[in-house]
Amino acid sequence: MKLIKILSCLSVILFIANCTTKKNIVTEKTQIPTKKAIIPVRDFSIVKEPNHIYFSILQLNDVAEISPIQSGQYGGLARVETIHKELLKADPNTMIVMAGNFLTSSLLGSLKYNEEQINGKQMVDVMNEMAFDLVTFGKNDFQMDYKQFQRHLDNSSFDWVSANVLHNVNGQAHYFHKIIDGKKHTIFDNYVKDVYDGKNLIKVGFISLSNSMDNKDYVTYSDVFIEAERSYNEVSNTANVVVALTNLSEQEDKELAKLFPKIKLIMGGNATANDLKNIGNINICKADPNAKTIYIHRFDYDILTKETKVKSTLLTIDETIPEDKEVKKVVAKWENILLEKVKTFANNPKEVIYRTNIILNEEQVLSKTKQTNLGQFITKSMRMAYENVDCALLDGGSIKINEDLIGNITPVEIFKMFPNLISIYKVKIKGDLLKKVLDFGEKSKWNDTYIHYDNISKINDNWTLKNENISDDKIYNVAVSSSLFEEIKSILSTNNTELSVYKPTENEIAYDIRKAIIKYFKNKKDIKK
């Protein structure tokens, strides 16, 4: 199969303006377009050869956000649908699939709608509008009770598949099912799709495996590789082409490729960033979470030789891609629910309160193990919420945002950081206790109680404040998040009579950490790296 052109040739002038194919490759994080992006031309057409049949798969994985992320620069399922429709126009045999982790917790998912926590309902709604073809379970897709999970299955118009994720009913493993028009439809352990071009017909088989994690008691897992062998043997008897849709670790995906070298492609989830690994002739492809990128796989099957060629292309979903109007309407319905929640602490949810030219939360994956610039800015805002405060302490696990921040920051981004009310307490504490708290935070790496701090450093194993060693007997005024305070009560519960805690009233800015952050950003000069 000839290479598919992602972008048609542009003039030299457009090339200089950065609107070549480089626009659709993940670029340097700290760059923000200063001019309106020029929409590149995409060409998904196929140059067809006799006795060949072609089909395409658009792959997403680990998507919890239906709207664009990073101040609107990347992602957004309405943009993905634009690409989906362009692919369908060029190749009617196009499928769109999700490699798990789409019912996971998100800011919107944590909110209530019609007296019930949303928990992925928005994802099913949008994916139905996009006419998804196939999905598999992710390790984080069961963060709800069984009744709500079953409603998601019943309300989905797309198919599900898994060879090793089963429904636990009183200790017995059963296939999950969907109820359609009052009838039970079993979710089987493999999936076969007919591909017909008007002349030739082939069958594409999917096997699917997911990583077993501690989940709800209504879920049970069987062995990944035993079930993979059984499922592969079943589907390969009828399918001309076999692919895998997985939500496994990188090592498990590699092992799967080694055990079944005739699989043509592994489309994986459980990713924190896009990745491409090659085992033999098999590509293992994972896109970025939240549709920052997607994978487009173009298949060329030779009817005579029975050989299959696959071309996989990573495409960045950014603001050069217009939003599909119909999907945008569905997204907007859910966005309005979010905006109403933001209005509880900010009158104008879309007000630009700051613009940053560097990435905040750059070390997102390690936010529970080290100080981050976002954590430092939040603790500074906490300290500014009071007069005469020496330092501020924040538990890293309280920061819930799951995207990097760059460009315009609005109260919506602040709400993503703290979807629940957290207050800032003012605690008078002796230095010896303060050091115990800091030691506790340092020992809590990889846990929610890892502590971010402001005005504090550790030099040669000594805790310092404003470059002076913290004195055991000195009293310090410390701004502490209410969530962290609850975690360190046992440390603070001593006979020390010098300890006192001030809890702000509702009319004080310290009552809501989000208001303190908004005030800080509005008053802050340009953030320097």
Image (tube, rainbow, N blue to C red):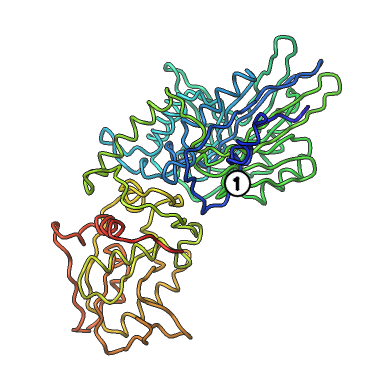
160 vs 132, nearest the viewer: 132
Image position of 205 (left or right of 180): right
Position of 387 relative to 115 (above/below): below
Q: Residues within 10 Å of mark 1 (few under 14, many from 20)?
A: some
Residue positioned 17% across, 66% down in the render: 503
Measured as percent of width and height from the top left, residue 271 is found at 57, 47
Position of 133 relative to 172 (above/below): above
Residue positioned 45% across, 54% down in the render: 357
Measured as percent of width and height from the top left, residue 439 is found at 41, 78
Q: Secondary structure at mark 1?
A: loop
Residue under pointer 1? 274
Image position of 496 (left or right of 94): left
Measured as percent of width and height from the top left, residue 512 is found at 23, 57
Identity of the residue furthest to the front in this view: 13
Identity of the residue furthest to the right in this view: 305
Quadrant containing the N terminus is: top right
Measured as percent of width and height from the top left, residue 369 is found at 48, 66
How many marks do you count on the picture?
A: 1
Position of 323 relative to 168 (above/below): above
Residue positioned 24% across, 64% down in the render: 424
Choose top left, top right, bottom left or bottom right for residue 264.
top right
Amino acid type of disc 1? Answer: Asn
270 vs 83, nearest the viewer: 83
